[in-house]
Amino acid sequence: MKPDLKWTALLLAGMLVLTLALAGCAGGRQPQRLTLYTSFGADLYTPLVEAFEAQTGIEVDVVFGGTGELLRRLEAEREKPAADVMLGGGAESFEAYRELFEPYTVKDDGLIPDALKAPDRLWYGFNALPMVIMFNKEQVAESKLPRGWADLADPRWEGRIAMADATKSGTAFVQLVTMLTLFEDDGDHGWNTVAAVVRNARILGSASLPPKGVDEGEYALALTHENIAWKYAQAGGPVGWIYPVEGTATIPDSVALVKGGPNPAAARRFTDFLFSREAQQLAAEQLGLRASRTDVPLPEGLSPTDEIRLITLDVAWASAQREEILNRWKDLLAE
């Protein structure tokens, strides 16, 4: 019996050591995580990130900044990327920096219209965002509202319009390109109109500041996204918005995988999630965003797409001419 007891004791001891070792490995395993660079405000990205974390257990570290700022950061980090996914900014910005991203086809690709994704799937449009003119109802009577972009050049709006700096904001860059496109026959390829609007405007450092200023009564008008104006109205602010009569652009806020990002598997899961019905419906119902999926209804309070005069921007041209356009813009601000 003694030999049997000896071997039994050794076997039990070995099993105990193995169990403790496995437990130690499990306890020391790091949770999956990813790093998201986004120009979405916290009110937009937080519900999406929290829903993804609850569904997958993957932790998301968020770095917030303007589109231009984040793109320059990605460029500086290109030898050793810190980010996995970039969310926010127009498609033209992603095209201009396409060497920083890598293609990926999301699971529900078939439900995303071609206009909202790159042919090679380098980027997808998370939503459709028409540009609008937001106004403060307490400062501007309905009969006095501007009808479109050209009206913003009227001297009566001097100092009463707010817009973001196109060198810092992807939103403002799209607004700039929209005016250049609509007024290309104004004698200086749209720049005469832009200059007249800028003379009346206060140029602010972030896309979030113009609509905030209108909501608080600091400005009468702001150039912004439709969903931002919707958000302030839903919160009870004294605001409304118009779709410019000449037409407006609807550049999507885009999303792409960062090339060489440290957590590619988690990045792909996050991107798939953003285009799931759950995430797109959340964005429509809670955030006022027009979904990119064709099976998600329009948020309550937004005008149907066929009632808005939409124009198509030449994304390839805007991307190729981005530096030249921004240099002209900086010269204009310096005058």
Image: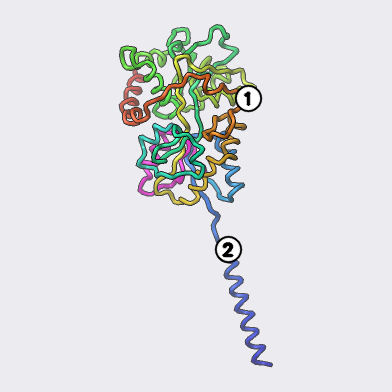
Q: Which residue is drawn at 39% across and 25% down?
A: 313
Q: Is residue 53 above or below residue 208?
A: below
Spatial separation of the CA atoms under disc 2 and disc 1: 47 Å
Say which of 219 and 187 sits in front. Answer: 187
Label 1: which secondary element:
helix
Say which of 13 and 145 sits in front. Answer: 145
Q: Can residue 66 be seen in this view?
A: no
Tell me: 267 left or right of 139. left
Label 1 sits on what residue type? Gln
Q: Residue at x 39, y 38 (%)?
A: 119
Magenta stretch holds residue 316: no
Magenta stretch holds residue 85: yes
Q: Residue at x 56, y 21 (%)?
A: 303
Q: Which residue is drawn at 49% across and 46% down?
A: 35
Asked which colour scheme the image uses, the reply is rainbow
Q: Where is residue 204 in the image (x, y as percent from the top left)?
A: 46, 23
- Quadrant location, the N terminus: bottom right
Q: Where is residue 175 in the image (x, y as percent from the top left)?
A: 43, 23
| Label 2 with label 1: CB-CB less than 8 Å | no
Q: Can residue 259 be seen in this view?
A: yes
Residue assigned mark 1: 234
Residue assigned mark 2: 26
Magenta range: 61-89
Quadrant of the image occupied by residue 258: top left
- Quadrant location, the C terminus: top left
Q: Is residue 287 above or below residue 273?
A: above
Q: Nearer the viewer, mark 2 or mark 1?
A: 1
Q: Position of residue 256 (x, y in %)?
A: 44, 41
Q: Where is residue 31 in the image (x, y as percent from the top left)?
A: 55, 55
Label 2 sits on what residue type? Ala
